[in-house]
Amino acid sequence: MDRAKRRAVLQSVGVLAAIALVCGLLLGAVNAFTWVDPRTEAYAKFAADTGKAFTLPEDDLGADRETEYTVTVGSRVMTARVEYYALSDDGTTHAFCAVGSGGYGGDVQMYVYISGGAIVQIVAGENSETFMDRLEGSASFYAQFLNVPVEQLLQGTGVDHVSGATRSSNAVTAAIGAAVKYYEVYLTEGANG
Amino acid sequence: MDKAKVRETALGGLLRNNPTFVLVLGTCPTIATTTSLFNAFAMGVATMFVLIFSNLFISLLRRVIPDRVRIPCYIVIISTFVIIVQMVMKRFLPDLYSSIGTFIDLIVVNCIILARAESYASCNKPLYSMLDGVSMGVGFICALCMIGIVREFLAGGSFAGIAIPGFPVMDAAASNMFGFIVFGCLMALFNFLVQKWNARAARAEKALPLAREGAETGGAAC
């Protein structure tokens, strides 16, 4: 490589690196201004969805618990995790922020609310799925989880997917499955024990 | 500043070089986010913000950026402003973010922004480039809003979220297929009107020397 060519390559790399560095610093500054603790955000979402109060605990209770699950959706074994859990101040509603993997656009965050031993509300959280509106528009997809006893859901009787949004349906089902497992294993069994 | 160039740049994005209806750029977000007027407007504003600032920075650095790495440099600059829009929207407008957040990421590869960076900002001064960003952005917002108004009215029987009673709702209008049909019809109407406007402007331009001549000769030619 002659000297002029080497100099041109070094100049190109240097300029690109300098621009990337300045852009990174700019993003860091904006991030410092806009960042919100995700746990605070999840608790605010719980309160907004249910209309009930959820007090943020001083320490992160249950942080040492196992929150990763494998959920069987049809013939597929998928992974999902519960990121945040809270009980409403009146003690009636269990709120979960769960994330299912394997969606068309990656992970799918779902907010699941259980009251009286059954799921009473499901709200989609952060996701990059372009077909989530098909799930929202389907009259039967979320209906197969709502008001069904948790014991029945744990038996895994099979879930009907939304046509054209199979991967999104799988990821959502996995997230709901993780919330149900967490509820059953740690809350019901823990309370009995 | 050259007044003629300012006028040409300012009006270019709105009419003659409208990014949506004339250059047919950014069709993916156009169809995806125009199911309601509010979403269309928000997407347009987000794109305009990125356009203005990416044009400004690319123009400022146009003599520094080597030709062989110009596209990676443009992408780094554009994606920085897209992420800024995303962070601000997520923090202050969470409902809007949950509605159109998926498509905000795609602004990085929006051909309107990359096309303006490559064809305008890289060879013009910063103020002209910013003006081009404003013009293209306003043209994009207007186009999105026009499509959004029609689709929201037909699919939801409402205007800007306000229900208009007495009109039959057509669910299919929210579909992408119908979005393309509305897009095509409005594009045809827009181009028809712009061509008429151009023809009138050309006639006026031709008539101008005669008028000037007439003025010089005491209006005898009129």
Image (cartoon, rainbow, N blue to C red):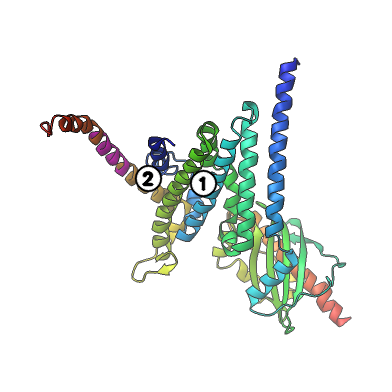
Disc 1 marks which residue?
B28
- Mark 1, secondary structure of its residue: helix
| A151 relative to B173 in the view: left or right | right
- Is there any visible trace of residue A69 in the rendered image? yes
Q: Nearer the viewer, residue B69 or B183?
A: B69
Check the residue under mark 1 and report the chain it is in. Answer: B
Q: Few, some or many C-alpha atoms within 10 Å of disc 1 (few <14, some 14-19, many ≥20)?
A: some
- Residue extending furthest top? A2
Q: Of the residues under marks 1 and 2, which one precedes in the sequence?
A: 1
Q: Which residues are magenta?
A: B193-203
Dominant secondary structure of the residues highlighted in magenta in the image: helix
The amino acid beneath tag 2 is Met
Disc 2 marks which residue?
B187
Disc 1 to disc 2, C-alpha distance: 15 Å
Q: Few, some or many C-alpha atoms within 10 Å of disc 2 (few <14, some 14-19, many ≥20)?
A: some
Question: Can you give x and y, in whole percent of width and height, for residue B33 in the image?
Answer: 50, 54
Question: Can you give x and y, in whole percent of width and height, for residue B40 in the image?
Answer: 48, 55
Q: Residue at x 61, y 47 (%)?
A: B81
Residue A10 picture quarter: top right
- Is there any visible trace of residue A128 in the rendered image? no
Find out whether residue A172 is within the magenta segment: no
Question: Can you give x and y, in whole percent of width and height, for residue B17 in the image?
Answer: 41, 39
